[in-house]
Amino acid sequence: MNSTILLLCVVVYFIGLLVISYITSRNSDNQSFFVGNKKSKWWLVAFGMIGTSLSGVTFISVPGTVGKLTGTDYIYGGFEYYMMVIGFFLGYFIVAGVLLPLYYRMNLTSIYTYLGRRFNVEAHKIGSIFFIISRGIGATARLFLVVNVLQIFLLDNLGVPFWATTFVLLLMILLYTYEGGVKTIVVTDTLQTSFMIISLIACIWFILNHLSLSPSEAYTVLSDQNYTHFLNLDPNSKTYFLKTILGGMFITIAMTGLDQEMMQKNISVDNLKNSKKNMLTFAVTLLIVNLAFLFLGGLLYLYAIQEGGFYGAEGFFMNQGGANIMGDDLFPALSLNGDHFPLFISIIFIIGLISALFPSADGALTAITSSFCVDILKLNDDEEKTEAEKKKIRIRAHLIFAIVFFALIMVFKAINNKSIVYLVMEIAGYTYGPLLGLFAFGIFTKRIITKKYAIIAVALLAPVLTYAINYTVSSLTDYRIGVELIMLNGLLTFIGLWVVSTTNNKNTQID
């Protein structure tokens, strides 16, 4: 494999992003950075959001989950992941019908401003802090997945250390986002989504031709070998289909509807009607694209088996004594090994992989910076500072969070989980649960909380109780709590807020 050619593709791709950044960031200001001056086109945002939602997790990890290894916490096989996608789909309708109208009615720059108006300043800040923690961990987990693939299959051969790869990629992201923010990202995400989907289609086309199968014939073969089962009927399993659908729905409500990064792009659309179009178009498209990635996963296993791959006691191997490539390692192992895929497919894979890397990282870094400046520092409300001073503070925060991203990626390198997709969902259960409970309590009740720090106490205690319950249930029973973790966490937060709240004759609900 010619590592130099593949590395050159990465450099050329990045230069293209810098050119787009230069064009879109001219005459930009803080409002361009935060909400794109509310001039984004809905169809452009919808298409770009596909790349943000899919990221490296879908591009690499989802195809790997199709493998038939059982008995672990994260990898179950078949198309069971699609039940979570169905849950995602249902969740987007709730976001479009309940949360988007609220955000537009209140004309929000940061969605956590709602918590401040509904409750108090402490609620506003704790909401933002939970988002910063949640998105920071989730984005760096996704970023680690792609960086690790580049490192193992490309840069190790050139003698480049992992920390250097991470540093350079984060520097790239900084260079094209620090000025234009959302205004730039709406355009770059669209470009990157296009390349990701082109890569997906090209890889499917190549494997189908190599196996001499049509799409329908390939599906029949996959079905015969039990790769296409959608339903896990074991209620004790983490991927039992009913709790996976419900968990996916609430994950979407939290990770999209209550997430500043995703909503920052939606509320940059000029009006509510177009923003809803964006959300629902995006939801339908995501159904199709995720199914295509699962189909690709099945094809990858068929291809690998034809090339000599086999299932062992603890994974999937291409040769005796070789490395386990089950899960996240399967797609890159085949794509970047010259003994399997040809060079042109390797180049397409690298472009798709880089396209999966940047949307999940650039948007997260921008949104975290925005939330910190708007919610924590109250930069928009500071009338004493000039626009130039505010911009300087924002750029400094952007740099600091890039350093935090670097540190978190190094932590994930130490953990090195074999299936990031389920790990990300589990982490989200702990970090987004309090946001789910806070917003649900604010929207669906009229109770008030008079004690200043009660909300902070409840929001911090709920994840701890959730972890304790999860640990106890797993230790004492055969039942495994999966993606419904976020529902439990949100419910505990809601109950805690009810306990510390009181009724009031004055209507505290936001009109």
Image (cartoon, rainbow, N blue to C red):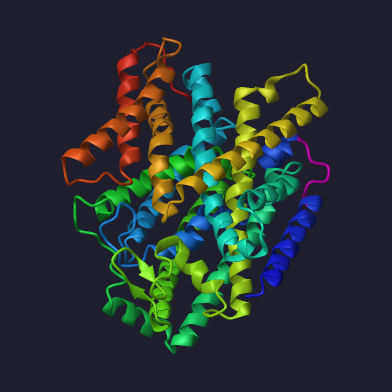
The answer to whether one can see residue 46 in this image is: no
Left or right: residue 369 versus residue 466 is right
Left or right: residue 289 versus residue 484 is right
Q: Quadrant of residue 447?
A: top left
The answer to whether one can see residue 386 in this image is: yes
Magenta part of the chain: 24-29
Which residue is located at x 67 percent, y 47 percent?
Answer: 167
Left or right: residue 112 versus residue 372 is left
Q: Up-down: is 365 above or below 287?
A: above
Residue at the far front: name it.
321
Which residue is located at x 67 percent, y 50 percent?
Answer: 164
Q: Position of residue 310 (x, y in %)?
A: 35, 75
Residue at the far bottom: name it.
212
Q: In this view of the protein, which residue sits in the foreground, 26 or 392?
A: 392
Q: In this view of the protein, which residue sits in the foreground, 478 or 387?
A: 478
Q: Position of residue 406 (x, y in %)?
A: 61, 42
Q: Position of residue 91 (x, y in %)?
A: 40, 47
Q: Is residue 409 magenta?
A: no
Q: Quadrant of residue 472?
A: top left
The quarter in which the N terminus is drawn is bottom right
Q: Is residue 27 magenta?
A: yes
Which residue is located at x 46 percent, y 64 percent?
Answer: 329
Q: In this view of the protein, which residue sits in the foreground, 367 or 78?
A: 78
